Amino acid sequence: MMPTGGIKDTIPPTVKDVFPKSFSKNIKPNKVNVWLNEDINPKDVQTDLIITPRVKDYKVNVGRRKITISIKDTLKENTTYSFNFRNSIMDINEENQIKNYKIVYSTGDIIDSFFIKGRISNVFTEEPIANACIALYDTEIDSLIEKNGPIYMGRSEKTGLFEINNIKENKFYVLAFDDVNKDSKFQKETEKVFKTRIVEGDSVFKNYKIYYDNTSKNQVTSTKQRKKSIVIKNTK
């Protein structure tokens, strides 16, 4: 008779160490190392990792119990960088996830602490939109967005909620779209746009509810703001 299994493992991995230490200041690391206490599943780490402000040239290597990010770009002066693994770090057997694991560094004296958060949902059904790419630009959104990626970005969860942290106090143009090819750039021919709106001043701190309208492929034709809500409508 074959023995039965034991109690199901429900405990996610834990981070044993990080180098350089998270929230370090005045550094420009060319490598970030994360050590875990158990074997991890490598399948989603590369695709789910979000580095903001955007770093174009980097490589992620996932070992059994170690993740290494090699950065080839030159990091900007006096800038806070966030390495957000979302829920991608999980054990290899039961896929228990470390929720929203993030590492933060500053190349200057200050860790930026501003944020924008909100929710993506369907304008008609109000059902949440999962895994939308929310992109923040410091220049007006036009045809150049297809060539230039955003400065900051995040992704919505299954609930449609998103939050982008550790950003500078600034004026941003916001675009939310379904990033089909996972390159963090809006492709107007193949990807649907959810929302485009300017966010400036104190509104960076507020909780915006954002509605998704799938009646058109990508053409935004009108915008209406209701207190903390922004409604975007497209034409068929």
Image (spheres, grey):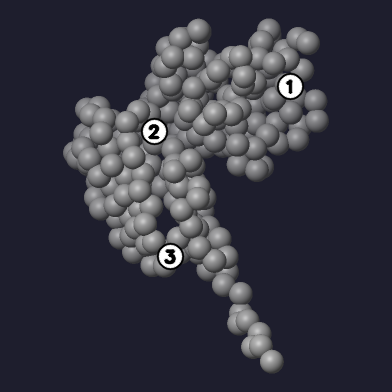
The amino acid type found where label 1 is placed reads Asn
Q: Distance between the residues labelled 2 and 3?
A: 27 Å
Check disc 1: other Cα within 10 Å, few if <14, some if 14-19, many if 20+: some
- x, y percentage for residue 20? 24, 50
What is the x, y in percent for residue 184?
48, 27
Residue that sits furthest to the bottom in the current view: 1
Image quarter hosting the N terminus: bottom right
Residue indicated by mark 3 = 39
Q: Nearer the viewer, mark 2 or mark 3?
A: 3
Which amino acid type is marked by label 3?
Asp
Residue 4: image x %, image y %? 66, 85
The circle on residue 52 is 2
Label 3 Cα neighbours within 10 Å, binned few <14 / some 14-19 / many ≥20? some
Q: Residue at x 80, y 25 (%)?
A: 124
Q: What element carries label 1?
A: loop
Determine the secondary structure under disc 3.
loop
Residue 214 - label: 1
Residue 113 in sight here: no
Whichever of callouts 2 and 3 sits on the residue coming sooner in the sequence is: 3
Q: Is residue 185 visible?
A: yes
